[in-house]
Amino acid sequence: MSTDDLSRKGQDILHIVGKAKEFTEELLKENERLRFKIASLEASGGGQMADDRVKTLDRRVHELEDKLAEVEARYRKVEEENKEFADRYIEIEEQNNNLANLYVASYQLHSTLDFKEVVRIVQEIVINLIGAEVFAVYLFDGNSQDLAVAASEGLPPSAFPKCSLGTGPLGKAVASTETTCWDTARSDDLRQPIVCIPLAIQKRPIGAIAIYSLLQQKNGFTALDHELFTLLGGHAATAIFAARLYSQSERKLNTIQGFIDLLTK
């Protein structure tokens, strides 16, 4: 169902609620008028005819009271539907906002081949969209199995320990190439993050994002966070890998060009 359909449905519900309210007010007025008539007849007397009219009016009052109860029940039902509609509308708005955030994050990651810029974009996504306070971006140190900190937030890179693939909580999580969440809101032990997002290309790890604490206003992880974990695990890995290759090729090209210039002088 589109946003326009939901908006039209909301207007219809509000129209029904307004009509129900008007009808309820009319019933209350009619009920009061009939009760006044009954009281007047009872006070003035009038014999059998008056008794018959009193009984007729009394039945009419009961019928109106039954209708009023029915209208109130329908009104409560419409109120419940209206609340469900409002909750659904908010949920769809949140989903649309989440999709927009995911699109922007994905676009930014692939908007440059500058290695430092790509890492900076990864940091911004982790801070602004996930809400991490202390985290580190780990990448493999050369051709070894050791992970070194390429960038960090909340603490200097030197504060975070190195680790090896398959060793310790972080190394094992990276080796699995699956995002791992530990049941905690904060970790003061830098050997034990609360979340590890392996950066992998075709199940081949090239690094990881280790989150150690969240911002104060962040209570936990949402569905969007888990979508971002998946996006970072694949798209960030691809962007970082491509930027690294481009940087290496640029350096080699400059070296070759410098060597050619020396030979041709």
Image (tube, grey):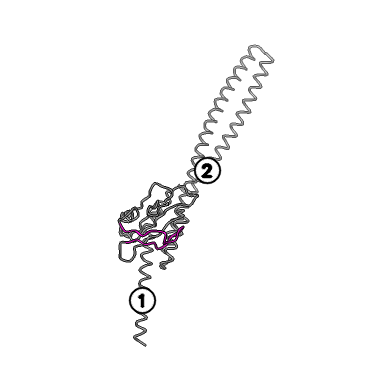
Residue furthest to the right: 44
- The correct choice, above or below, for 89 with respect to 45 in the image is below
Circles 2, 1 touching at the beta carbon (< 8 Å): no
Give the image quarter of residue 16.
Answer: top right
Q: For numbered disc 1, what is the local secondary structure?
A: helix
Residue 95 lies, in percent from the top left, at 45, 50
Say left or right for 196 vs 83. left
Which kind of residue does numbered mark 2 sit on?
Answer: Gly
Q: Earlier in the sequence, mark 2 or mark 1?
A: 2
Observer-nearest of 95 and 40: 95
The question of residue 152 being in magenta is answered with yes
Observer-nearest of 169 and 68: 169
Cα separation, mark 2 vs mark 1, equals 62 Å
Report which residue position mark 2 lands on.
10
Residue neighbourhood size for the residue with mark 1, other residues' Cα within 10 Å, grouped as few (<14), some (14–19), many (≥20): few
Residue neighbourhood size for the residue with mark 2, other residues' Cα within 10 Å, grouped as few (<14), some (14–19), many (≥20): some
Question: Which portion, as a residue range, is magenta?
Answer: 146-165
Residue furthest to the bottom: 265
Q: Residue at x 53, y 41 (%)?
A: 12
Q: Which mark is residue 234?
A: none
Q: Which mark is residue 253?
A: 1
Observer-nearest of 141 and 43: 141
Residue 63 lies, in percent from the top left, at 56, 23
- The correct choice, above or below, for 201 with respect to 78 in the image is below
Residue 87 lies, in percent from the top left, at 49, 43
Front disc: 2 or 1: 1
